Amino acid sequence: MFASLHGAGNLTALALEFSPVVERSARDTVTLDASGLDRLFGFPQDIAAAMARRAAETGVRASVAMASNPDAAICAARGFAGVSIIPHGDEAKFLGELPLALLGPSHELLETLERWGIRRFRELAALPPLGIAERLGPEGLRLRELARGEAERKLTPLREPTRFEDEIELEYPVELLEPLAFPLARLFNGLTTRLATRALATDELRLRLKLENRAEYRRTLRLPAPSLDGKAFLKLAQLDLAAHPPPAPVIHVRVEMNPVLPRAAQSGLFLPAAPEPVKLELTLARIRAIVGEGRVGSPELLDTHRPDAFRMVDALAHARANERGSADGGVRLTLAFRIFRPPRAARVALDSGQPGFVAAQGIRGQVMERAGPWRTSGDWWTRDPWSRDEWDIALSDGALYRLYCAPEGWFVEGSYD
Amino acid sequence: MDGAALKKQFESALAGPLEWQARPAPEMARTGVHEVDASTGGLPRGGLTEIHGAASSGRTSLLLAILAESTGREDVCALVDAEDAFDPIRAAAAGVRLNRLLWVRCAHNAEHALKAADLLIQGGGFGLVAMDLGDTPPETARRISLTSWFRLRRAVENTPTVLLALARQSNAKTCASLTLECRPEARVRVAPFSGRGPGRLLRGMRVQVTRRKPGQAVTAAFDACDACAPQPLAYARGSLRAATLRAATVRERCV
């Protein structure tokens, strides 16, 4: 089944709301493949009514026609106002009274047909095909097929727009983030609906805010997995803007979404559940707002001997990259170490060149047992070398600590636990 | 027919007492330490487990074992670190899969740690959420109201998540489903250092874990050795021989 819209307004956008296969047949006509819409709307008249209703809502003035082939639908949409449904097999009868000019024949051909007294579809359809072929050639035969509503062809679909963006000019400059949520929600909802109609999702949101001082403020939110959750996008954008507020009131909002294929994931039956990626990103954004940027993630060890060398990486991306192959030997019962960040400056009394008494913030006691010094150094070929002598000590308070002496002085690095 | 008669009728049909009000036993997760699992049965999912003990009592060693076990079975774990004390190098050496661990560093703020733990539990999907208040001063930890602990307990109820709190002393009181107390083994008196003189090593400690709740106290013990301390041998100067000797001895002990 095919549907055709003929009229004025943004017909293409309207057609794309109903089907991904849309042909722009003329400046004022679009045709769409309506097969499968019956599962959503029901009978062809219900589909056509839904289109007419949506056209009225979006301010598009168009006549709607449905037929079993695209050209019959186009002719009906052009020839009849309102909603027309052509039953399969009745095309010639239905279109019979329409004028031939609707078919758009060449000027000479139309003149010839008028001289013969043929002005309507019905009259052309009644002519014998052999006679038309002899006198009018292939173009005449094509016109006869169209007039009988028998022309079969495939649609030439529009290329899908690759940019998903929308914008809103605000009526007055917005200073607070809360009122900004309303235009953002509207933009996110519209864009996610457009993505959903094309079975797409997004993995990146780009916000462009024009400010009152004529500057442009840009923020980019990358999602750990493609999603279409408009509410989560809004909350993420709000948290991001709260963490990085624009320097001046906002007068214009523009949102762009990067279209990607949705995430197709199938969890293992016996694998434990993991946090849903977008929900986790939202949770992490909320936690970042509490503890600060760069303080949430997975630790990744660095290839160096420098003590406490690691960096924080995005939790999920890191997990995905190492999803297979990082399983190793399992649990090894080792003595854990609790690091004092920053190291606690200590006052150390030496006894025969070895630490005998240690006092630091929250730590004070006689050194009962010790091992060391273990002298370590590294990165001497860089501008940031390190060098220190380490002791493992047992203090009279019963705890085990690591003490080190660096050029800057004595420090307690942490405790064994 | 009154309720008692109906119950009696059911019990006679079922050939046993009807315990429809009894709660089902919680699913337990292994800790990764066989001795502790044998004495406690594991950590209850959907409940709050509290591990407490003084500094150098082995509580963090137990935490690392639990994290290693949990990440090893593909659970995604979260560590809310109130005092920023987590050592990822040691954790990796203990078998913790860092790519399945979310580390929240709260920069010496217990209140932030509570909020972060609450958000993580509400978000769902974690196999283990551990809140490390191990270096938080006892007076600060005591100021966390019982209401906050109750809120955390309610949040984790009916989820497959193990909520773990590590502190110097027990804070959650009645909200904890399982309480474990760690202390260095005193009776056996295992010295943490080996030998005498320049080749002396910190070799580890024997940790005694006592289940304080539920039921009667049950004690287990395990060894946490300093086997995997990273030694920068390649760039060591001066005491290279001593450091090599130390690493070799440790390896030998560990094997």
Image: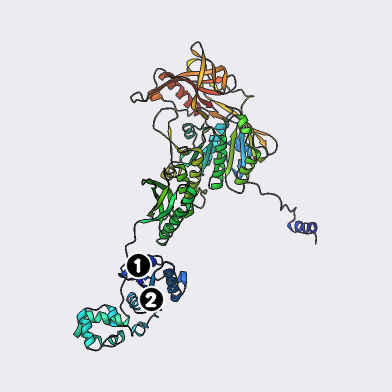
- Give the residue type that dot 1 points to: Val
Residue B208 horizontal/vertical position (percent): 62, 30
Q: How many marks?
A: 2
The reply to the same-chain question for discs 2 and 1 is yes
Residue A64 horizontal/vertical position (percent): 39, 74
User: Which residue sits furthest front?
Assistant: A172
Q: Is the C-beta separation of discs 2 and 1 under 8 Å?
A: no
* Quarter placement of the C terminus of chain A: top right
Q: Foreground: B65 or B252?
A: B65
According to the image, label 1 marks what residue?
Answer: A22
Find residue A37 and report its image quarter: bottom left
Q: How is the image coloured?
A: rainbow
Q: Earlier in the sequence, mark 2 or mark 1?
A: 1
> Residue at image x 39%, y 61%?
A198
Q: Nearer the viewer, mark 2 or mark 1?
A: 2
Using the image, determine if residue B104 lies above or below residue A272. above
Neighbour tally class for label 1: few under 14, some 14-19, many 20 plus, Cα within 10 Å:
many
Q: Foreground: A34 or B250?
A: A34
- Give the residue type that dot 2 points to: Ala
Residue A156 horizontal/vertical position (percent): 30, 68
Left or right: A346, with A170 as reference point: right
Q: Judging from the image, what secondary structure is the residue with disc 2 in?
A: strand
Query: Which chain does the numbered disc 1 sit on?
Result: A
Using the image, determine if residue A229 lies above or below residue B189. below
